Image (tube, helix red, strand yellow):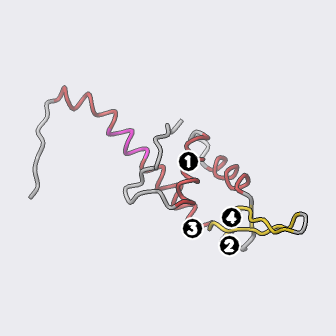
Amino acid sequence: MKKKLIITETQYGRIENLLVESTKHSKLVKEIKDFLDANYSPSDNFTRKGGEYFTEPMFEVTVDEELISPKSLYEYVNYKFDTVGESFIKQVIRDWVDGKITNDYKLSKNVSIN
């Protein structure tokens, strides 16, 4: 059963900015997530130091299967989506790796776009 909510113009004016920002936020998360899904996949790289093996988080480029560091991925995504703040991009990458981006493209932590 669908229910309708009736609000006045004054009430709509108060929440309009929240609705627009939420929609813009979700669209940016979706755009960055789709870009990451299409071009990268999380991977591990094993390095040997002092006779022991350690794992380093890396990302595999889908096209040529080259491994790149998290810093390189962040720098490229930051370059590609230059209108978005650094903390926002970092949070999207963290949530993408951890699988925490929800179906409605919300992040696990509230982060400003700028």
Q: Which residues are magenta?
A: 19-25
* Residue 103 sits above or below residue 64 on the image: above
Q: Residue at x 52, y 58 (%)?
A: 33
> What is the three-letter code of the residue carrying label 1?
Gln
Residue 63 marker: 2
> What is the three-letter code of the residue carrying label 3?
Ala
How far separated are the C-alphas under marks 1 and 4?
16 Å
Earlier residue among tags 3 and 4? 3
Residue occupied by mark 3? 38
> What is the three-letter code of the residue carrying label 2?
Val
Q: Residue at x 74, y 58 (%)?
A: 69
Q: Secondary structure at mark 2?
A: loop
Q: Are marks 1 and 3 in contact (CB under 8 Å)?
A: no
| x then y, percent, for residue 92 | 54, 51
Left or right of 59, for residue 1? left
Was residue 22 drawn as part of the magenta stretch in this picture?
A: yes
Residue occupied by mark 1? 91
Q: Nearer the viewer, residue 59 or 44?
A: 44
How far separated are the C-alphas under marks 2 and 4?
12 Å
Foreground: disc 2 or disc 4:
4
In the rendered image, the quadrant that contains the C terminus is top right
| x then y, percent, for residue 74 | 67, 51
User: Which residue ends up furthest to the top in the rendered image?
Assistant: 10
User: Which residue ends up furthest to the front in the rendered image?
Assistant: 51
Task: Estimate how packed mark 3 is, as few (under 14), some (14 to 19) or many (20 or more) residues with alpha carbons within 10 Å.
Answer: few
* Residue 89 sits above or below residue 11 on the image: below
Left or right of 108, for residue 104? left
Left or right of 35, for residue 67? right
Q: Quadrant of residue 12?
A: top left
Residue 59 marker: 4
Left or right of 8, for residue 46? right
Predominant secondary structure in magenta?
helix
